Image (cartoon, grey):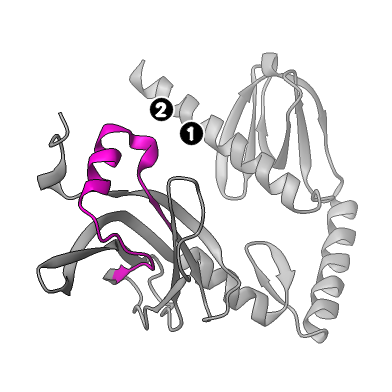
Amino acid sequence: MFRKGQDMNKRQLLLIITGIIVLLSAVRSDADTLILKNGREVYGDIIDETDEYVKINMSGDIVKFSRGEIDRINKVTPEEKERFEVEEKKYEIDQSKKGLVIYRGRWMAPEEKADKIWGDSCSISNISAEWSASPGGSSKKSWSPRVMAMVENLSKSFDIESLYLKILILDADKNIVGDSVVEFVGTVPAGYNKPIITYGSGQLTSDTSFAYMDADISRKWRAEVYMGNSEDGPWKKVKSVIVEIPANFVGVAD
């Protein structure tokens, strides 16, 4: 029973992947097609058929469907496959002559590919923010929002050489406080992590503000974190987090 469940999960995953491929690229005209009774279409090469099931090769994965799941089958002839291979080869040559390269099944400019590899490789996690005390003058203190995160390069071969983080601080009314802060992270080698600590714009000079925030979470400020590959962007929003109040002010107002 457990094995059967594993097979079902694998097949469902392959169907989802196949659906995504169909949406993002042109349907293969050289592929056999299974039209299932649930409305889905499965593309690949049929490698085995019986009265009870059909086995199809879906990009290297062999999946078996029972005849009861299948509404109808569309097969391509050897001549059609040969014609498609010729057309596909010509298309690849034409795209290469234009200076385009292929990435994740799509032709694009080399610059776009580099940007996509950069975006796919960069992961920013464990994002948090808190108020951090700093000397403000005489016996007073000022408080600044400190933002912490972990930058991870998911690629095993691609170094992230130009990574910037932008920090926006929003008050309880969702107004941007001060200016945005842009932090240059620097190089993150393939497969490595890099902890980041930076400070957002905006300060508090009164401890009493924390009492209001502790009593009403809606009064807490937020830090928005963005990432980009230049100091001018373009920027992709990563996450928005609450700027937590210092632990020694939690519950004081009760």
Q: Position of residue 125 (x, y in %)?
A: 34, 56
Q: Residues within 10 Å of mark 2 (few under 14, many from 20)?
A: few
Q: CA distance from mark 1 to mark 2?
A: 6 Å
Task: Give the extent of the magenta segment.
Answer: 198-224
Q: Residues within 10 Å of mark 1 (few under 14, many from 20)?
A: some
Quadrant for the C terminus in the image: top left
Q: Give the residue at x 88% y 66%.
A: 87
Q: Position of residue 144 (x, y in %)?
A: 28, 64
Rendered view: 92 above or below 60:
below
Q: Secondary structure at mark 1?
A: helix
Q: Amino acid at mark 2?
A: Gln
Q: Is residue 134 shown left or right of residue 104?
A: left
Residue tagged by mark 1? Answer: 10
* Residue 97 located within the stretch drawn in magenta: no
The residue at the far front in this view is: 138
Q: Amino acid at mark 1?
A: Lys
Q: Give the residue at x 78% y 36%.
A: 33
Q: Position of residue 7 (x, y in %)?
A: 46, 28
Q: Is residue 157 shown left or right of residue 175?
A: left
The image quarter in which residue 146 lies: bottom left
Instruction: Please give the label number shown on residue 227.
Output: none
Using the image as rendered, state which of residue 92 and residue 239 is in the foreground: 239
The image quarter in which residue 152 lies: bottom left
Residue tagged by mark 2? Answer: 6
Q: Position of residue 109 (x, y in %)?
A: 72, 78
Using the image as rendered, state which of residue 190 and residue 253 is in the foreground: 253
